[in-house]
Image: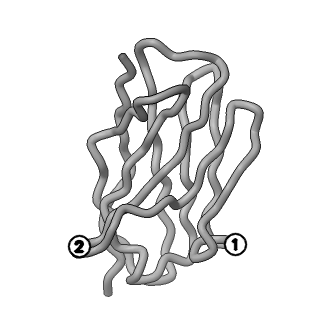
């Protein structure tokens, strides 16, 4: 079993920045993929960014150039630096860990972008 604990969400004005963190514990394999999804009210959960243990990254088109995903393999942690935030980035952000099914999820952290 894998446990994920997220932190770093909150309220920020448009144009501001936030940094999300997610720490994984439990049965962690060295080769894995971690990342972030988000879900806004009334919308489906969507992939924001992912990063493999080898450092390969993938981003949603809507966040390219604004968000940066990184990880620390020694700490089994993944981070999401979010800059130039927009109101449409408002959502609950979920960290995930994937090695093989099932995908493991964090509890979610709220990000609200509003003036």
In front: mark 2 or mark 1? 2
In 3D space, how far apart are the residues under numbered discs 2 and 1 (Cα atoms)?
Answer: 24 Å
Identify residue for label 1. Answer: 65
Expressed as whole percent of the image width and height from the top left, the position of residue 113 reads 36, 77
Give me the disc on residue 41. Answer: 2
Which quadrant holds residue 110? Answer: bottom left
Give the residue drawn at x 68%, y 37%.
52
Task: Check the image and tell me how it is coloured.
Answer: one colour
Dot label at residue 102: none
Residue 92, by quadrant, is: bottom left
The residue at 57%/70% (across/down) is: 83
Category of crowding for the residue at label 2, using alpha-carbon neighbours closer than 10 angstroms: few (below 14), some (14–19), many (at least 20): few
- The percent coordinates of residue 33 (x first, y second) are 60, 36
Q: Residue furthest front?
A: 101
Q: Of helix, strand and loop, which one carries label 2? A: loop
- Tell me the quadrant of the picture where the N terminus can be found: top left
Compared with residue 59, is residue 12 higher up or lower down, i.e. above or below? below
How crowded pointer 1 is (Cα within 10 Å; few <14, some 14-19, many 20+) is rated as few
Mark 2 vs 1, N-terminal side:
2
**On the picture, is 58 further left or further right than 14?**
right
Residue shown at the point (68%, 55%) measured from the top left: 58
**Is residue 35 shown above or below 10?**
above
Q: Which quadrant of the rendered structure holds the C terminus?
A: bottom left
């Amino acid at each position: 079993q894998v446990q994920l604990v997220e932190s770093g969400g909150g309220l920020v004005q448009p144009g501001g920045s936030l940094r999300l963190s997610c720490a994984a514990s439990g049965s962690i394999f060295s080769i894995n993929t971690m990342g972030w999804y988000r879900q806004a009210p009334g919308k489906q959960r969507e992939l924001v960014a992912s990063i493999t243990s080898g450092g390969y990254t993938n981003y949603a088109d809507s966040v390219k150039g604004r968000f940066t995903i990184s990880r620390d393999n020694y700490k089994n942690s993944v981070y999401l630096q979010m800059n130039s935030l927009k109101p449409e980035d408002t959502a609950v952000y979920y960290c995930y860990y994937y090695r093989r099914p099932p995908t493991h999820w964090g509890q979610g952290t709220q990000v609200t972008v509003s003036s």
